[in-house]
Image (cartoon, rainbow, N blue to C red):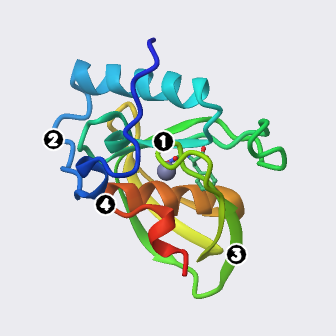
Amino acid sequence: APSLPIAQQGEAILAQSAAVVTDPLHPDIQALIRNMQATMLAANGVGIAAPQVFRSLRLIIVASRPNPRYPDAPLMEAVAMINPEIIWLSIETCLGEEGCLSVPGRRAQVARAERLTVRYLNQQGERVEAAYSGFVARIIQHEMDHLNGILFVDRVG
Ligand SMILES: O=C(NO)N[C@@H](Cc1ccccc1)C(=O)O
Ligand SMILES: [Zn+2]
């Protein structure tokens, strides 16, 4: 699958709220998931959101793994989340370093909820509810922000 161009900070699409995916099993959506995965891997990313590849859709990929940009990242199976909704956030927050494929060269400490529960459709169109914590919960909050037109630098004081 080809690596797609990544929208950079300043592109209008990154400040928009993305649209709900109406047909998760549509071949276009399945192809987009594959292309987002390839794009994220090529950039050594640990997550990516559809608006970053110029598709204003509520679709994210979460794929933490140790890599040169995040050597301490936990290893997990990459997961595509269609129409994700965070249905619970812990009150406890923690600070952690973030970067963004759309804001190259910037890293900053961002406060995020330590734990969360997310409801989404998986790549097979099945409903899933799952709990995450730590760095993976951080990635999910970062990607969800993209679906709502928010960049991590908007959250840095
Ligand atoms: O730009 C993206 N995703 O939108 N990718 C980020 C994801 C991320 C999120 C939170 C903390 C660290 C990293 C990346 O650097 O791989
Ligand atoms: Zn990002």
* Kind of residue indicated by mark 2: Thr
Q: Residue furthest bottom?
A: 91
Residue bearing the label numbered 2: 22
Q: Position of residue 46 (x, y in %)?
A: 62, 42
Q: CA distance from mark 4 to mark 1?
A: 14 Å
Q: In the rendered image, is residue 134 in sight?
A: yes
Q: CA distance from mark 2 to mark 4?
A: 20 Å
| Mark 1 or mark 3, earlier in chain | 1
Could you say whether the residue bearing mark 1 is in a helix, strand or loop? strand
Left/right of residue 60 with respect to residue 37 in the rendered view: left
Q: Which numbered mark, 4 or 1, is in the foreground of this view? A: 4
| Mark 4 or mark 1, earlier in chain | 1
Q: CA distance from mark 1 to mark 3?
A: 20 Å
Left/right of residue 157 with respect to residue 129 in the rendered view: right
Left/right of residue 22 with respect to residue 31 in the rendered view: left
Q: Residue furthest top?
A: 1
* Kind of residue indicated by mark 4: Gly
| Mark 2 or mark 4, earlier in chain | 2
Residue bearing the label numbered 1: 48
Q: CA distance from mark 3 to mark 2?
A: 35 Å
Residue bearing the label numbered 3: 95
Residue bearing the label numbered 4: 149
Q: Which numbered mark, 1 or 2, is in the foreground of this view? A: 1
